Image (cartoon, rainbow, N blue to C red):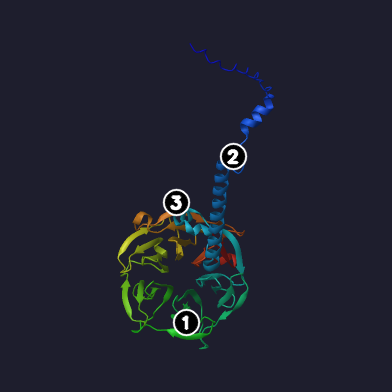
């Protein structure tokens, strides 16, 4: 039998020496360590938040820039971007224009750069002021050796010519934008003893005139050539119709002064609504001047009430104006009135009020 093959003796394994345990802080540091260049997980939300804040800031800057550009072009308060809100916000007193004695009428160019004020005292002329109240000149009637007394003024939006009613002569005088007398307005078919008082241009360019001549007081509409289009009123209906205004929608607003009411009609002269005399909220005493701005706000001067009533036209599509508030109070201080007589508006959120017995035109704004 062969002898068994002897295998070499195994070499004893070297004893395994356990490395010493690292200190606790070293274990924590090793656990937190991340490969170089890999972002920390907590940094991502922070970065996203920073980007969102930056985006919101850029949007805000863009909106402010748009507001500024819009105001620079149109000179309207930024709140006009929110017409529903703007209609509810009342205007506030800004300043007064002095230099006209007992002003009864006021008109203003759309941009507010020229203010025309007819005075019933003093020189009995129409004085012209700039937007800051500096007098620029006067509108002189024809040199015809007649007595003249301007009442109301209105500006033709198509030509910027200034129309002025003259009570003693029963005339409407027309001046160019520089204040030079151009001509007298004559209806195509002459009206006997014509007595024009208030005027307003409609969106279609036609002219509405309140007429207090005999045999009865009425409101007349003329086309651009002076042809009579329609007459509103019959015997006993109107008693000294005074101010007249037309909204952008073509609705007609007439102050029937001695009947103490405001009449609302459509563009064809059909009655829609009225506001009468009384002591309640929004009721009238002796209404005179009237104006509608491009935000649909209606202003009615109440001479004996010593205020200007403010309404919203066509609320919820209804023809009857909705009363909003009153401007001013009786007195001689800023924002107070003594027998105001007329009101005008520009397209930049300003309201001009002829404050007769305080010998000034007050300017209010939004």
Task: Tell me which corner region of the image, top left, top right, bottom left or bottom right, holds residue 222.
Answer: bottom left
Residue 347 shows in the view: yes
Q: How many marks?
A: 3
Q: Give above or below for 365 relative to 14.
A: below
Residue position marked by numbered label 2 in the rendering:
40
Where is residue 6? Give x, y as percent.
56, 15
Query: Could you tell me which secondary element the residue under label 2 belongs to?
Result: loop
Return the residue found at the far bottom.
Answer: 144
Disc assigned to residue 174: 1
Q: Which mark sits nearer the N-terminus, 2 or 1?
A: 2
Return the residue found at the far front.
Answer: 1
Where is residue 188? Give x, y as percent.
35, 84
Label 1 packing within 10 angstroms: few (<14), some (14-19), many (20+): many
Residue drawn 55% across and 41% down?
45
Viewer-nearest of labels 2 and 1? 2
Query: Could you tell me which secondary element the residue under label 1 belongs to?
Result: strand
Mark 2–mark 1 distance (CA, rounded to whole Å) = 79 Å
Q: Give 222 or 44, whichever is nearer the viewer.
A: 44
Task: Identify the image quadrant of the C terminus.
Answer: bottom right
Q: Which mark sits nearer the N-terminus, 3 or 2?
A: 2
Where is residue 195? Give x, y as percent.
41, 77
Residue drawn 55% across and 67% down?
72
Residue drawn 36% across and 72% down?
219
Task: Tell me which corner region of the image, top left, top right, bottom left or bottom right, holds residue 331.
Answer: bottom right
| Disc 3 and disc 1 in contact, CB within 8 angstroms | no
Residue drawn 56% across and 17% down?
7
């Amino acid at each position: 039998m062969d002898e068994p093959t002897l295998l070499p003796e195994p070499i004893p394994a070297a004893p395994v020496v356990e490395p010493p345990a690292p200190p606790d802080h070293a274990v924590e540091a090793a656990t937190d360590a991340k490969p170089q260049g890999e972002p920390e997980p907590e940094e991502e939300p922070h970065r996203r938040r920073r980007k969102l804040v930056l985006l919101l800031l850029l949007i805000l800057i863009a909106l402010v820039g748009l507001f500024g550009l819009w105001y620079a072009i149109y000179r309207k308060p930024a709140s006009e971007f929110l017409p529903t809100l703007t209609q509810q916000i009342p205007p506030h007193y800004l300043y007064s224009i002095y230099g006209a004695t007992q002003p009864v009428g006021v008109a203003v160019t759309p941009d507010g750069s020229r203010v025309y004020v007819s005075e019933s005292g003093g020189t009995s002329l129409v004085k012209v002021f700039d937007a800051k109240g500096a007098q620029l000149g006067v509108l002189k009637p024809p040199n015809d050796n007649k007595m003249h007394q301007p009442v109301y003024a209105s500006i033709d939006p198509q030509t910027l010519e200034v129309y002025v009613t003259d009570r003693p002569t029963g005339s409407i005088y027309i001046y160019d934008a520089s204040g030079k007398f151009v001509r007298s307005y004559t209806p195509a078919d002459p009206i006997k003893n014509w007595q024009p008082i208030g005027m307003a241009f409609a969106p279609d360019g036609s002219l509405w005139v309140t007429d207090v001549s005999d045999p009865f007081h009425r409101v007349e509409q003329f086309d651009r050539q002076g042809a009579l289009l329609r007459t509103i009123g019959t015997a006993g209906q109107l008693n000294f119709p005074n101010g007249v205004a037309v909204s952008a929608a073509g609705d007609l607003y007439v102050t029937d002064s001695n009947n103490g009411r405001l009449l609302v009609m459509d563009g064809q002269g059909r009655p829609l609504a009225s506001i009468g005399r009384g002591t309640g909220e929004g009721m009238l005493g002796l209404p005179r001047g009237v104006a509608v701005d491009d935000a649909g706000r209606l202003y009615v001067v109440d001479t004996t009430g010593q205020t200007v009533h403010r309404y919203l036209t066509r609320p919820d599509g209804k023809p009857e104006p909705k009363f909003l508030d009153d401007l001013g109070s009786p007195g001689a201080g800023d924002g107070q009135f003594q027998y105001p007589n007329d009101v005008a508006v520009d397209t930049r959120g300003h309201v001009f009020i002829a404050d007769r017995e305080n010998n000034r035109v007050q300017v209010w704004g939004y």
